[in-house]
Amino acid sequence: MGKVVLVTGVARQLGGRFVRRIQRDPDVDRVIGVDAVPPEHHLGGAEFLRADIRHPAIARVLAETGVDTVIHMDINGTPLGKRGGRASVKETNVIGTMQLLGACQKAPKVQRLVIKSSTSVYGSAPRDPAVFTETTTPKSLPSGGFAKDIVEVEGYVRGFARRRPDVAVCVLRFANILGPCADSPLAEYFSLPVLPTVLGYDPRLQFVHEDDALEVLRIAAAAPRRGTLNSGTFNIAGDGVLLLSQTSRRLGRPTLPLFLPTVTWAGTALRSIGITDFSPEQIRLLTHGRVVETTQMRETLGFHPKYTTAETFAEFARSRGPGLLPPESLARTVDRLAGVLPARGGPTQ
Amino acid sequence: MADAKVIPFGEEPRARRKARRAGRTGRDTALAPVPEARTEHPPATPPRPGPRSLDERIAGGLAFLRRRITGDYEVDDFGYDEELTDQVLMSLLRPVYEKYFRVEVKGIENIPASGGALVVSNHSGTLPLDGLMLQVAVHDNHPAQRHLRLLAADLVFVLPVINELARKAGHTLACAEDAQRLLERGEIVGVMPEGFKGIGKPFADRYKLQRFGRGGFVSTALKAGVPIVPCSIVGAEEIYPMVGNAKTLARVLGLPYFPITPTFPWLGPLGAVPLPTKWTIQFGEPIPTDGYPSEAADDPMLMFNLTDQVRETIQHTLYKLLVQRRSVFF
């Protein structure tokens, strides 16, 4: 059976990699990549259609190509490249999703819809349970920014699933995706020479490796394997948890603890001069952290990530090069100290 | 200081009590019967590692330092850092536990050697030192050196520094989701259902248990099928005798209460030093919850009955311990 897959947001690294990956699948006939800007990377022979999902033209694309599987990956927290601000990102996220869903609703051939969502939908607050399941309703809903977009997007997706019960809808809520070529705000943050942190808070973080993200998208895009179900909402995260203090030590980058009001102020200042895109919700994530439960991912979706959170981070740290305080040299210093001290106390071994 | 008004309940004869205190001969027959299965665990103190040589300690300390500065340690989903808790946080609390409050622990055999259990305790003392002491008590006295995972108020996780330390010490937010997750993982979870009503009650109301919330802890224990271990802490009430409550100031600061004690805030930081009372922590006989059907957790009548049973047990044990207590400070 030949499948026609439409992937949105292919101008991003992850979208491009996914198109190249799914192109190699034997039961996929045709892959159509869609984005508002042409990608800088090659798409491995997949067709590229320059179309803006914010415009109704996307409905024509769906109708003409006879797409049966839609992978919506054009949901992002930050603009691609330097152009466009938060407003255009929000428009792509929310209006784009609405248009795309409207188009899918009119396209009778569509059988499967996969949404790349994010665990940002849970927000980050001190009064929430420590671990979020797919059914947890957060105590304080995100008030703005990317998290609000995600909440709205998922709302539209639920509406679509009600109107088109014949379409298998899979919402994948990804934790922070990291990898050698990740271009997320968090990856940018970890590339700073000194990591500003919030004084008195040590958030718990979870990561997903890019390879795992691609693999789970592929599972969601294909027909469900025996004994699994790939429609519904799933949290996707690597096993285990890292504290921000641990990540900075493993990266070898010193931290600079700042008072919470200072961090918020500095974030606004940096954002306005365009050095970094440090949104208030990123600051909330780096204050309170977020951990999700992944039992559904394992048991229902049947996906077992290859990388744990710690391994994902180690891979990422390797790709970024050593920081100011590389853990290896710190360890050597301690070893040298250990070598000197017992000599004074007499032979011990 | 005069003792609280005490209504003795089923007090045992003084001679018998003395005999028990003098020679701890195996089983405590005066207490309620202990389940048969527990008799094989002798209530002996766990083998403490003997004093290590200086070199060993330096080597251990350096290995610890090496792991810490390179970030090579593990935390669980709740942010619990077992290594830091064992090596640093517990060592900081232990002098307070052993030397300052001289905590005496009874009935530690009521905490199972493995599997989950919900320890329900009274709450007092203006600052939640009783929770911390309870954590040390369980860890240091239990033969399996089990770690108590405390459920803390949301205020703890809003405050900077405090939230970080609380998470690393294994505490988490007091909500049904977190409690159930911990219990299903087979942890010992500690909860103080009185909450702020208990810890911030005036000195005149000492050792009077407050309302036990909505009894959510019982349904959580029932859902997880773990026993409830009632626990009574005597001594914590007198560490900060709260004679007044500056309500306006508390509201301005966003706190549930602002204590005024004979020394605080008059003496400044010196007034915040707790009084060196003598503490007793008694764990009661576990109340099994695995015999109920699965829908029992939704039966409010059963919940109220079980909540009352736990509450009465703790209250009676408190009275009993108060009668036995010779002085607040010794």
Image (spheres, coloured by chain):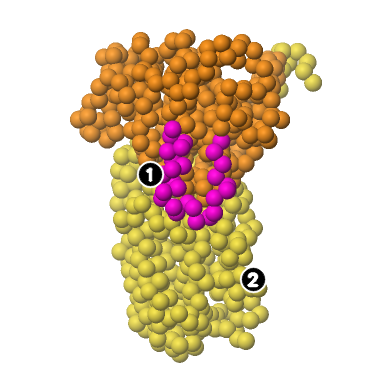
Chain colours: A yellow, B orange
Question: Label 2 is placed on what type of residue?
Answer: Gly
The chain that hosts pointer 2 is A
Q: How far apart are marks 1 and 2 (CA)?
A: 41 Å
Q: How crowded is mark 1: few (under 14 residues within 10 Å), some or many (20 or more)?
A: some
Q: Is residue A215 left or right of residue B203?
A: right
Q: How many numbered marks have been drawn onto this rendered protein structure? A: 2
Q: For the residues carrying marks 1 and 2, which lies nearer the camera in this image? A: 1
Helix, strand or loop under label 1: loop
Disc 2 target residue: A227
Point 62% across, 55% down: residue: A307
Q: Which of B78 and B204 is in front in this view?
A: B204
> Looking at the picture, do discs 1 and 2 lie on one chain?
no
Q: Look at the picture and state if B203 lies above or below A13.
A: above
Most extreme residue toward the left is B248
Kind of residue indicated by mark 1: Arg
**Residue occupying image coordinates x 62% and y 50%:** A311
User: Could you tell me which secondary element the residue under label 2 belongs to?
Assistant: loop
Q: Which residues fall within the magenta stretch?
A: B286-312
